[in-house]
Image (cartoon, rainbow, N blue to C red):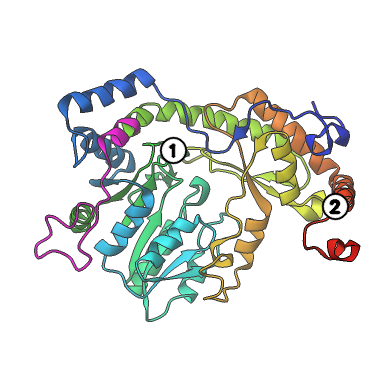
Amino acid sequence: MKCDLGDLALFGGRASFLQPLLVGRPNPVDRSRLFDRLAWALDNQWLTNGGPLTREFEERVADLAGVRHCVATCNATAALQLLVHASELSGEVIMPALTFAATAHAVRWLGLEPVFCDVDPLTGCVDPQRARAALTARTSAIFGVHLWGRPCDVDGLEKLAADADIRLFFDAAHAIGITSEGRPVGRFGDAEVFSFHATKVVNSFEGGAVVTDDDDLAHRVRALHNFGLGLDGGNSAGGTNAKMSEASAAMGLTSLDAFEEVVRHNRTNYRHYRTELSGVPGVAVIAFDENEQNNYQYVVVEIDEEVTGLHRDLLLDLLRAENVVAQRYFSPACHQLEPYRSRQSAHLPHTERLSARVIALPTGSTVSGEDIRRVCDIVRLAASRGPELTARWRRARRSDQSTAPPVRGSSEQTRVG
């Protein structure tokens, strides 16, 4: 247990963890079941091109999302791009900047312009009123993002899209298996996109999917993910190769087998974090609605520097010195990154505030209650002595800089020479 600042690894103490404790470490699966599926694919010599394992995976994902159609893809970025192509979007697409860059990149890569709007300060999801204010004659769609597995204001966005007669899609990369007002994510808007990246609660090594109840849209996405084959007269984009392989589907199915167990473990971890950090001034675990189904994939903590006297980034450095590899989600936000920063002058105060204050702490099947207790000991110590910790870190930094050897070409090197 860390009792004093001198115990912290940042100041020379021993690291709390021998092996790194990571955000997004893949959840273990039943290897024998995975290998059986892989062997079946090899024995039957059907390794890609919509094989039986991929079709089974699509059926199970569609059932979990409560929709008729699921088109599995090689990754979620490709799924986003297929959806844009299949919907024949043009011009501008409104989305939040508080998301992984892939949401915006997928749209820009196809020649459309992402237009960023601010988020609800409580949920971190796109604010329908601010999205409405961002509408122009060039707007063809809105992409909502179910951030950290917390659903958007679905009703508000659906009303906005209907009023404006534009498409509504959701980036549901974090959100498989969750509900909004009792309805499963996956059936909202015109379509939603899941991610099955190795870091996700359901993973297929790499993978994604478009899920929808729109028969024509599903048909177009499925054709476009296989070079446009099956579309009468072809397509102006010509299609691409974005199919999921049978090996990825085997992993996806095996991960789905473990999904409920993983969610139970994540829920226990989330509640441990909530209990351990309850009452710590300036530290708040972002809450999930316990009346809804959640996958608890992320434990996100907001750090209020005005209360703690501790900047979020210093806490990250402190944790990483202890071998706790926490992450910023998402900082900088998309509008603060190129190629968007120099193209738009967006002022998004709620986005920027959250982006500068939140971190994701390690969770998942490999993280134990004892791990969480030790992580929270560090966070409590840091938050309770933030000004002193910050001052000590600054002194150590100045000392390190003053004793460091001159850098070749520096002004000091030139003067001495």
> In the picture shown, does residue 342 fall above or below 384?
below
Residue, disc 1? 198
- From mark 2 to mark 1, how far is it between C-alphas? 39 Å
Q: Residue 149, position in %: x, y?
A: 49, 46
Given the image, on which type of amino acid does mark 1 rest?
Ala
Magenta segment range? Answer: 225-251
The residue positioned farthest toward the top in the image shown: 32
| Mark linked to residue 71 | none
320 and 409: which one is in front?
409
> In the picture shown, does residue 362 fall above or below 238?
above
- In the picture, measured across the screen, residue 400 lies left or right of residue 20, that is right
Residue, disc 2? 401
Label 2: few (<14), some (14–19) or many (≥20) C-alpha neighbours in 10 Å: few
Name the N-terminal-most of marks 2 and 1. Answer: 1
Q: Find numbered disc 2 in the image and state the secondary structure of the residue it sits on.
A: helix
Q: Is residue 252 magenta?
A: no
Residue at 76% of width from left, 52% of height from top? Answer: 311
Given the image, on which type of amino acid does mark 2 rest?
Gln
Q: Residue 394, position in %: x, y?
A: 86, 51
Q: Residue 271, position in %: x, y?
A: 61, 32
User: Is residue 185 at all visible to an observer of this figure?
Assistant: no
Which quarter shows the N terminus?
A: top right
User: Is residue 93 at all visible to an observer of this figure?
Assistant: yes
184 and 102: which one is in front?
102
How many numbered marks, from 0 up?
Answer: 2
> In the picture shown, does residue 258 fall above or below 236?
above
Q: Residue 56, position in %: x, y?
A: 23, 34
